[in-house]
Amino acid sequence: MTRRQNIRSLFLGSSLFPALVSELLAKDAAPDNPLAPKAPHFPGTAKRVIFIYLSGGMSHVDSFDPKPKLAEYQREGKTGDNGRKYLGSPWVSKPRGQSGLEITELFPNIAECADDLCIVRSMHGDNNDHFQATLGIHTGSVTFKRPSLGSWVGYGLGTENQNLPSYVVLAPDMPYCGSQVWSSDFLPGVYSGTRITSGPEPIPDLNRRAPSAEMQKLELSLLERFNRKHARQHPGDPLLESRIKSYETAFGMQMTMPQVLDLSKESDATLKLYGMARGTTAGFGWQCIVARRMMEQGVRFVELIDVGSSKNWDAHGDIKTHEPLARNIDKPIAGLLTDLKSRGLLKDTLVVFTTEFGRSPTPEGQTGRGHFNRAYSSWLAGGGVKGGLAYGKTDDFGMKVAENDCHVHDFHATILHCLGFDHTKLTFRHGGRDYRLTDVAGNVIKDILAT
């Protein structure tokens, strides 16, 4: 038997403590462990990512790229090119922090963290439809299914904790495109995101179903024997090895994940920072604090999705529907940034805040805004990016990118760079060609990097 097979055998026989097993497996870089920790192409400034995604299309001109001229033109009855009318924002903006970044009062708590934010105001994508744009910001492709960003990160880095997945998604409802958002697609299935909801059982079957621990050990031991017998009959099958590994991770999760989800030892001050009441097991504050705890436990990539494919940021009828949605996430995100910083985690944790596209500076109906993929805003914090910076620029009305455009491929290339990857070399052979997250495009935005 190989060293790794011995570890597995002892694991299933419960001769080793789970934490020791996890450490041994993490240090064992045998090729049959697809989640073994791996070195990136070069030393990165970030070791992990928290990816915050707002479903439906948040308005850039009402948040992180305010445009006073919109209100001026609306108030004075002026029109732009081709008689175009404009809709002013109901939220006032002002300079924030020492950097003086302009942010509206839609996000008052996040605005207090302005000096940690690198706002990219020149984002643009390839499609104006929710489904395609959602695929684009997650997979880099708006036409075909591709592996998610989180799956690429897991494929490139592995995981630091063999008892937890490399990629976790905290989502109370299904977004546009459903589970394709966190799918590994043609990458081995072990790199797919594990979805966690909220409530008494955030992960199905996390609690042991077997009548006793001894019975579960027997069942798993028998399963291991069948799996190994099947593997000997089909040598060199990476999908089969990934499936076996997924069983090991699932068993590890039963021991480790309940501790991660147990917030009882968090201080009252910490809970208050996230806007949480003690005993809460739902809400965006719960998602954010669980994300921090997962970062501490070695999970590489955690995605936070606030709402699903309905009742989201898609403000066709009234832009003021942004208000309760922003209130739901504003304090928890600010608390997350503050908490990560106070624990020394923000310096090597990249926090990403984005949506699939922005909203039109022109009105839809009386007070709504339509889809707008030609220009929108996202921001990053920590993980080696400059804080207190606005990169890129739109025109006076937020209608088009005027300076330093940033395509979704550039955004992805920069995230991978912070993790230590040359995005052109993080590839996977599929269907006779090498694929990558950024397809055949993408440039790292070097101006936003701290080093």
Image (tube, rainbow, N blue to C red):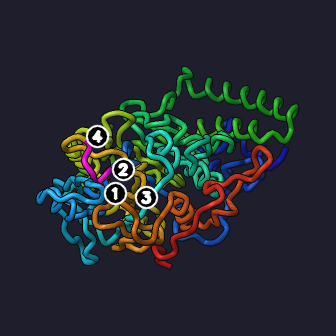
| Three-letter code for the amino acid on which mark 2 is drawn | Cys
Side (left or right) of 77 relative to 379: left
Asked if the residues shown at circle 1 and circle 4 are in contact, with their CB atoms under 8 angstroms apart, the answer is: no
In the rendered structure, which segment of residues is drawn in magenta?
A: 358-364
Marks 3 and 1, how far apart at CA: 12 Å
Side (left or right) of 185 relative to 100: right
Looking at the image, tell me whether mark 3 or mark 1 is earlier in sequence order. 1
Marks 1 and 2, how far apart at CA: 6 Å
Task: Name the foreground residue: 54 vs 285.
Answer: 54
Looking at the image, tell me whether mark 1 or mark 4 is earlier in sequence order. 4
Marks 2 and 3, how far apart at CA: 13 Å
- Please, what secondary structure does the residue beneath circle 4 have? loop
Circle number at residue 336: 1
Return the residue at label 4: 316
Return the residue at label 2: 288
Return the residue at label 3: 352
At label 2, counting other C-alpha atoms closer than 10 Å, the crowd grade (few under 14, some 14-19, many 20 or more) is many
Side (left or right) of 317 relative to 358: left
* Residue 292 appears in the picture as rendered: no
Task: Name the foreground residue: 114 vs 220.
Answer: 114
Q: Quadrant of residue 109?
A: bottom left
Asked if the residues shown at circle 3 and circle 1 are in contact, with their CB atoms under 8 angstroms apart, the answer is: no
